[in-house]
Amino acid sequence: MSWLVVVLSLIVLWIASLCKIIHTLRLPSRTFLLSNGGAFCKKNVLLVVAHPDDESMFFSPTISYLISRGHNLHILCLSIGNADGMGNARKHELYKACAVLKVPVQQVNVLDHPELQDGFGQIWDHNLLAKIIKDEVSSHEIDVIITFDKYGVSGHCNHCDVHYGVHKLLHENPRSIEAWELSGIDREEFGSCGGCSGSTKRCQRTNRLSHHWSM
């Protein structure tokens, strides 16, 4: 019964996120994702996630919007999600999901690093994450990074670590990179570096994509 509650909660969270993004895009007075005063400028965008299914569960409305606007989207998934021994299957499911979302398979990079294994007890090194993400940014001349907020959206510690890996990269990188995070409406914006502090209660809030800094 508990798994059913979790699944239903995730579905509600996804629907709420989709509705919020659609509503935001319809407001003319708001600053839109990658808008440039009405003039279209194609961007190289990197979505950084922790596990296969993060792209669908949390970011599919954003992916659909970016693809529909003609931006060049790359996805970096930092693990195969092998906590339950289903990593290879989840990896293939990610590729299938990206095909449905119209993201070219050659622009999807799924890692299986020994120090970045899926699990609530797994602590991911922020320096390692920053280096990996930096290499991806350099390889594809990325203009914009999108990832989780500091609570990891769902409170998963791997999500939180990804956030802080991006945070570290942007604060050490002299190149100008625009960055966005998926965050709860009532949450604070990017703060100082720290550990995972998410909670189940926090992740029940409606989520939105927030522009948190540009360096």
Image (cartoon, rainbow, N blue to C red):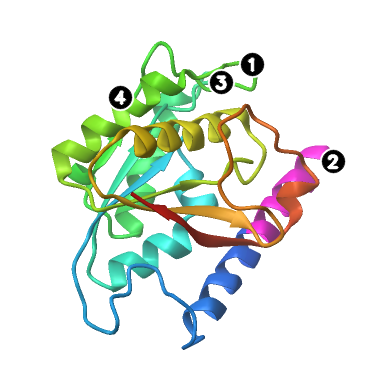
Query: What crowding class fits label 2: few (fewer than 14 Cα within 10 Å), some (14-19), or many (20 or more)?
Result: few
Q: CA distance from mark 2 to mark 1?
A: 24 Å
Residue 16, image x and y in percent? 65, 66
User: In the rendered view of the protein, which quadrant contains the N terminus?
Assistant: top right
**Can you identify the residue that label 2 sits on?**
1
Left/right of residue 22 with respect to residue 137 in the rendered view: right
Up/down of 9 relative to 43, above or below: above
Q: Compute the Cα span from label 3 to label 2.
A: 21 Å
Residue ID for mark 3: 83
- Label 3 packing within 10 angstroms: few (<14), some (14-19), many (20+): few
Rendered position, 120 above or below 138: above
Of badges 1 and 4, nearer the viewer stands: 4
As for residue 8 lying within the magenta part, the answer is yes
Which residues lie in the magenta part? 1-13
Residue type pointed to by label 4 = Lys
Task: Look at the numbered discs 3 and 2 and tell me whether their residues touch, using CB distance below 8 Å.
Answer: no
Does 194 lie within the magenta span? no
Q: Tell me the amino acid under the disc marked 1.
A: Gly
Tag 4 and tag 3, C-beta contact below 8 Å: no
Residue type at mark 3: give it: Ala
Dots 1, 4 in contact, CB < 8 A? no
The residue indicated by pointer 4 is 131
The CA distance from mark 4 to mark 2 is 41 Å
**Residue nearest the viewer, comparing 38 with 88:** 38
Judging from the image, what secondary structure is the residue with disc 2 in?
loop
